[in-house]
Image (spheres, helix red, strand yellow):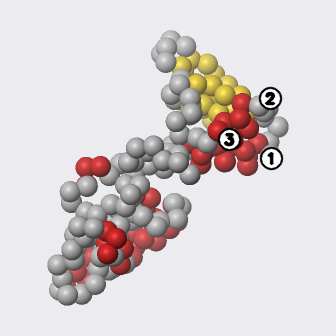
Amino acid sequence: MRRRGRHRGWRGNSAGRRLSFLRSRRSASNMLVRGAGFADTMSRYLIRRIEDNPAIGLRTHTQIVAAGRQRHLERVQCATTDPADVETNDIRHVFIMAGAMPNTGWLERCVVLDDKGFIKTGFRTVARRSGRARWPLTRPPYLLETSRPGVFAVGDVRGGNIKRVASAVGEGSIAVAFVHQVLQQ
């Protein structure tokens, strides 16, 4: 898999794969893209699969701006780059793929990040490959502890996380227990 830039990668692939999966179970699907397209973030084979499928509507420069419901989702309003151009569509399901790129550039000098920009935690913070990682304590880092003792990372921003809400919540609970241990030291 080719990479472009330090923190870029192929984040559109997740959305493309999910759309292909959902498309096999629905009669029609629409993909809204906020930008001009996804050529920089999605593999060519997925782009072709989406563009060649007549049951998939692709709308660029478009985003959801409102949702309406009575007892369940019934409609959404979509807007293009022209704020006056708002369209209402009857719809029952919405799946949002907001991307999988961590916003951690601001942490680069504080904690060790992997080559994709995710925060290294636990034993990964002191592994030889992590370059400048120097663990200052005699004890090893806790499971969710960053390269900075007493600072923990949980959820999607952490390298090795499985990118699920339930796991992030569980990691948060574990991190709280580790914080209590650090405070008692």
The percent coordinates of residue 42 (x first, y second) are 58, 41
Q: Is residue 32 above or below residue 126?
A: above
Label pair 3/2, CB-CB below 8 angstroms: no
Which of the labelled discs sits on residue 46, or is there none?
3
At 24% across and 70% down in the image, what residue appears? 133
Quadrant the C terminus occupies = bottom left
Q: Nearer the viewer, residue 34 or 185?
A: 34
Label pair 2/1, CB-CB below 8 angstroms: no
For badge 2, the amino acid type reads Pro
For badge 3, the amino acid type reads Leu
Left or right: where does residue 24 sit relative to residue 176?
right
Which of the labelled discs sits on residue 25, or is there none?
1
Nearest to N terminus: mark 3 or mark 2: 3
Single out the mark in the foreground, 3 or 1.
3
Mark 2 Cα shell of 10 Å, populated few (<14), some (14-19), many (≥20): few
The percent coordinates of residue 45 (x first, y second) are 69, 41
Residue under label 2, please give it: 54
At 20% across and 57% down in the image, what residue appears? 109
Mark 1 Cα shell of 10 Å, populated few (<14), some (14-19), many (≥20): few
Left or right: where does residue 149 sit relative to residue 9?
left
